[in-house]
Amino acid sequence: MKFGVIVFPGSNCDQDVHYALGSVLGQHVDYLWHGDTSVSGYDCLILPGGFSYGDYLRAGAIARFAPIMPAVIDFARSGGLVLGICNGFQILLEAGLLPGAMMRNACLQFRCQWTYLKVENNATPFTNRFREGQVIRIPIAHGEGNYYADAATLAQLEANRQVVLRYCTPGGEVIPAANPNGSVGNIAGIINREGNVLGMMPHPERCAEGILGGTDGRELFASIVDCWQRGERLGA
Amino acid sequence: MEPEIYRQMGLTDEEFDRIKEILGREPNYVEVGMFAVMWSEHCGYKSSRPVLKLFPTKAPWVLQGPGENAGIVDIGDGQAVVFKIESHNHPSAIEPFQGAATGVGGIVRDIFAMGARPIAVLDSLRFGPLDDPRTRYLMGGVVGGIAFYGNCLGLPTVGGEVYFEPSYAGNPLVNAMAVGLIEQKNIRRGTAAGVGNAVMLIGARTGRDGIHGATFASEELSEASEERRPSVQVGDPFREKLLIEACLEIINEDLVIGMQDMGAAGITSSSCEMAARAGTGMEIDIALVPRREEGMTPYEVMLSESQERMLLVPKKGAEERIRAICRRWGLEAVIIGRVTGDGLMRIMENGRVVAEVPARALTDQCPVYERERRRPAYLDEVRQRDLRRLPQPEDYGQVLLGLLAAPNLASKEWVYRQYDYMVRTDTVAGPGGDAAILRVKGTSKGLALTVDGNGRYCYLDPERGGAIAVAEAARNLACVGARPLAITDCLNFGNPEKPEVAWQFYQAVMGMSRACEVLQTPVTGGNVSFYNETESGAIYPTPVVGMVGLLPDIEKRCGMGFRREGDLLIMVGETYPEIGGSEYLATFHGLVAGEPPALDLEREKAVQALVREAIAAGLVTAAHDCAEGGLAVALAESALAGGLGAEVELASDLRPDYLLFSESQSRILLAVAPEAGDRVLDLAREKGLPVTVIGRCGGHSLAVRINGRTLFNLSLEEMGKQWRESIPVLMAR
């Protein structure tokens, strides 16, 4: 399986994702340059965290215009696996591959901390190694992770089980006190209707080894590999 | 030239005469500007240079000592660590967000200028009391600025310290330390060798921001300082991120001879320092410098402190390749001049010479002042205060809760949760512990990092306070299991033209030097920040020590949190009746007085060696430095960090408050498995160190008895609430 990590100017988790996939999981992984226009030959694309183009305007707002994005969009529309982490999630929203928008954290500050997440849907290429309802632990680090979608969109997301991860307490309660950024419905990660594009604010690459304090991130990446090896077609 | 002109730039009449003597003529306006910034205290170290010579700077593992962009230490396997600390106090006092942000940007550039990949940032901050709204504004801005810049760069801010004290109210301290990792073969120095080689400027365009920032840093703060706001630069961390990647590619392809950051004094300092180091000269045409705005004069171009720019001297024939790399990263790269053999800085505008001065006149010939030193009169008053008659507390539990809520001791999570301390996935122990630990990918090694200083101790005794800053930093590294390698220091003081300040400075450097000698941690560089004064007086003398240590095997590391029920608590070292300068004395008796705790450096060294040895042997489950707040606070911190309580039984004839809150040095609290207890005690006795079993880990509260009498029994919840909520509540006011 071949992973491609897209490097935008200002991406800063690209090397971390590369390390987790390449050195920890032993997968084939390459960097893909934002200025290129092809993603052919890859089985999964990862849009990593960081501050693409400085995010001085609105997180991800400039990156969606990068030369590589039309190829990413085509890849996604034809069923290719795409994972957007943090800034990558923001870019997927701006590019219209996922519904909704990101606002500044409700506390108006950057937040770096471990969070507990409830796996709301494990029937995805990204979460199949978890049990449904399982509580996992993955860190966040962002200033704009306050996910918003209007009521109609939310209802659709819920109806189609597109909400994959929600912030929760260690015991799995989805309550405001467990929400680090004010996101609607404690949403931490959503998937597209077709089930091949996941956006999530938490950073799985930061917990792929025990020495970093947890391995739930490794399980998330391993889910992708499992899914691909089983040759499953995607989808809900 | 009218004296008002050069005086306004910060030069004295004598200095101006000296310039005339060097040049053999009257300098022109541009030249005076160049001399003024290079001979400013900030760039020229004119009051500190003779004193800084006292520092030990050599050890077999020190690859680069003071005088370069940053220091370098060998960590084996052909790798090295590059690190340096720097202040951005004055800019942060008037524009906290950008002042702190560009402080981070500047120190990070010093790291990759040497060819190293920046891997971490630490910061040491000092403010006035938090009940002052101005302090809250400053702290919010400073922390926000550090977060803005460091987070965007993708550099984890892994550690630091924050203190609150009235003496910093008008003049906060913002010291940032950056750390980088390098393959030794890639080390580059800031040198402009090779006559005929090109001089290139890469990165941001040059604007009018920050002109005379270095001069501003070399004067006291006053009401008029608000007008200096335009002297504060504006940071663009996105551009710096691109600059890092481009420069590291350039280094990896072996395309440059030397590289230097453009920080204080911009093109002037970077060019003349590179030339002076190589013994060469430079010819620069400022018309070639890409501008951000029109109509800039040669003077403005030479003195601009626009951020995110680097000056480099490429290898012959590498210019095109460098341009291509920069283009790929969206950066401009322009040849602005050549290296010459005549030792002169020749500045031209469209071929017309606008300034011509010897490079070394700007650097090496900077005047040096042996400042008059006088022991300050306040010392007798504060030192000789009789502390034996202080009333003893009635409720020790309340005292401990109060100390845990004191902003100097309370949890700093409000600060560090705004910093991305995990990016780069090397952070094995982040903020909040004795020292941060980073792994070195592809090896079994770990790096341990800390910054430490105690202005209060230095105020009461700068010599001892300086020594303690070094000792405590090394002790913090020992607590995680690391061997200290070297330090970088940021020396924050008042106006050195005042004999009392010059005395404090000299004494502090003496104390630090002594500790560095004994603990074998040479000084590899740093920064001196003088003129930290407002109308209400000078700050406490505040040397801040940034220290780097090595863990040969990262699996053999230790944290401060209690981990296992039933583990024995062992105190290494001894408690003396030393509450002078303590947090207890300040918080409960409202006094900053007495003598700071004594420091026996040989004892200190032995305690640290013991703890390292015990950790390496796998005998220790937790280790924590007993520092500010004393034994009681150390116990509470370890209990809270591990979520596990303890029962402690002390036997002593000291006053209970002295026993619990004295800040005696060279003490480390250990938790060890019961079966390992005897081995640790034996190891300590072999080294002739006092060591006492004081209790056991367990339960959900911290209970302390002295001579059989229970002094307090506090639940983790009660203590945690005070400790965690104190700063967030104060900041929300």
Image: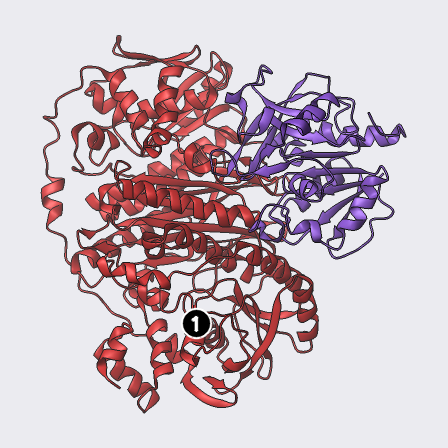
Chain colours: A purple, B red
Q: Which residue is mark 1?
A: B269
Q: Quadrant of the C terminus of chain B?
A: top left
Looking at the picture, does residue A204 appear above or below residue A8? above
Q: Residue at x 47, y 58 (%)?
A: B106
What amino acid does circle 1 point to?
A: Ser
- Percent across and percent down for residue A5 are 74, 45
Q: Under tag 1, what secondary structure? A: helix
- Percent across and percent down for residue B649 are 32, 13
Q: Residue at x 73, y 48 (%)?
A: A6
Q: Is residue B685 visible?
A: no
Q: Quadrant of the N terminus of chain B?
A: bottom left
> Is the residue marked by circle 1 packed among few (<14), some (14-19), or many (20+) residues within 10 Å?
many
Q: Residue at x 42, y 37 (%)?
A: B415
B544 or A179: which is nearer to us?
A179
- Percent across and percent down for residue B386 are 9, 33
Looking at the picture, does residue A57 appear above or below residue B388? below
Name the chain letter of the residue that bears numbered label 1: B
- Percent across and percent down for residue A27 are 80, 38
Looking at the picture, does residue A179 appear above or below residue B713? below
